[in-house]
Amino acid sequence: MHRYILSLLLILCLTPVKANPKYEVRAAWVTAVYGLDWPQAKATSPDGIRRQQAELVAILDKLKAANFNTVLFQARTRGDVLYASEFEPFNSILTGQTGRDPGYDPLTFAVEECHKRGMECHAWIVSIPLGNRRHVAAQGNKSVTVQNRSICVPYKTEWFLNPGNPGTKEYLMKLVNEMVTRYDIDGVHFDYLRYPENAPRFPDNKEFRQYGKGRNIDQWRRDNLTDIVRYIYKGVKALKPWVKVSTCPVGKFRDTSRYSSRGFNAFYTVYQDAQGWLEEGIQDQIYPMMYFRGNSFYPFALDWQEHSNGRQIIPGLGIYFLSPSEGNWKRDEVERQINFVRANGLAGQGHYRVKYLIENIQGLYEELSESYYSTPALQPAMTWLDSVPPTMPEKLTMKYEGGYAKLNWTPSQDNDKRNDPYYVIYASDLYPVDTSLAENIVAPHVQGNNFIYAPLHPWEAKDYFAVSAVDRYGNESKAVQLDHP
């Protein structure tokens, strides 16, 4: 039976999905720790600031050109940050010195540049690890191990926040609160929200005796992480309910009926009850780190989807393994995984890391931009939070100015008055424009109530247009159609 199921899975993942979906998360992690993806230049002078910002702009331009719509921007690494925080120092990667102000706010810059390109920007937060002794020492008195010693524990050669201390969730929420309230981020994305791997001797016996309340230590640890997730989720929704809350758990939840996790999984190895978070509804998205291939990928991707509770499952693809120095996978391994994700209705894909996209390892970037992501995609809606679309735009008009077609329409209204909708522009040679087809999207994220249509080549020009409105939960209105060329 297992052999039959796995053969069926193989057939599904080898079968290409012909049309690109209209709704799909296409995400990339932009890793700041050690400057792995960004930055290389140091912001120690006006010229250094410009070069550092230009590096990020070049990354975002490449992602936009390939129709990515989500950037997971690393805003916190290990007890240090890439924004102006009241609680933690600037990461040394910005200037070469821990705590030194780079002369601008990288998170503000990232959000603004992503939004200019119609892409969401999620603040990626490393949650529990605080770094090794040398890293912590470099932070001096600004280190959380000094400022909030009671919630920190040393384990082996590193420091960690202690998930068993109730103060940990409150401290993390302080960081999240300043990000959510001060920045127009679209999501908060939690990494390493887990215990160290295979750590039965993690130093939390004192807290276990105090708070265990009859549970075994494994269940207590899982409950601690769940309590943090719940506390932050509710805290974010009280501030800005449209801000997405997500985590990237270990890619295999636990053994499935189809295949064994071979002793490495979220539930037992690092105490993450991530499917329990989905069931409780305290996640909007899950990006399981599925940096595997073959039977270590497909059965577990299905398992996440089957336990999604209607939330968005976006497998993280280990594209770094395409590099000869990392794993030397063949590109078709990634292509099969994308086909499988689409064929089984998962919400999209995340790519780890952006460096391997930008460098076009094994031609992956070209293949995505020319085939899998050749058309834009809209964000899937979070209907469990808000399912009411904005009102339909009205009075769509077009006139030619300077050789270009300028579209105007009456703005839409949304039931959440805190946010104005954005607009999707469709164009086609046929009337009415079929707005169900991704290939008819010419602009997926337009602010304001006008748009200049200027195709690169005259023979690409379309005759008919339609415009819809989308709110920050992803709900799309009906489209107003322009019935004459």
Image (spheres, helix red, strand yellow):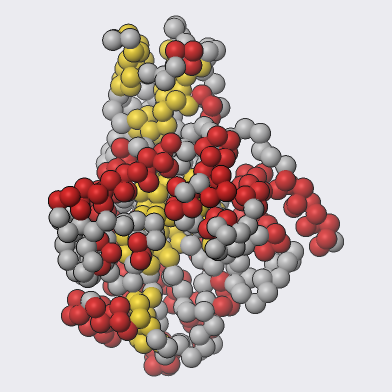
Q: Is residue 19 left or right of residue 355?
A: right
Q: Residue at x 53, y 50 (%)?
A: 361
> Where does the image place residue 235, in percent across and percent down from the top left?
33, 61
> Where does the image place residue 357, in percent across and percent down from the top left?
48, 48
> Where does the image place residue 440, in percent across and percent down from the top left?
51, 24
| Residue 449 in view (yes/no) | yes
The quarter of the displayed image where residue 436 is located: top right
Q: Residue at x 39, y 86 (%)?
A: 157
> Where does the image place residue 264, in percent across and percent down from the top left?
61, 74
| Residue 188 in view (yes/no) | no
Q: Is residue 56 left or right of residue 48?
A: right
Q: Residue at x 42, y 20 (%)?
A: 456
Residue sitting nearer the eye, 332 or 145:
332
Say if 133 sits above or below 476 in the image: below
The quarter of the rendered structure image containing the N terminus is bottom right
Say if 170 sits above or below 418 in the image: below
Say if 348 sits above or below 41 in the image: above
Q: Residue at x 66, y 60 (%)?
A: 293
Q: Is residue 191 left or right of residue 149?
A: right
Residue sitting nearer the eye, 384 or 160:
160
Residue sitting nearer the eye, 200 or 164:
200
Say if 221 sits above or below 449 in the image: below
Q: Residue furthest top?
A: 484
Q: Residue furthest front?
A: 324
The quarter of the displayed image where residue 21 is located: top right
Q: How many marks?
A: 0
The quarter of the rendered structure image containing the C terminus is top left
The quarter of the displayed image where residue 16 is located: top right
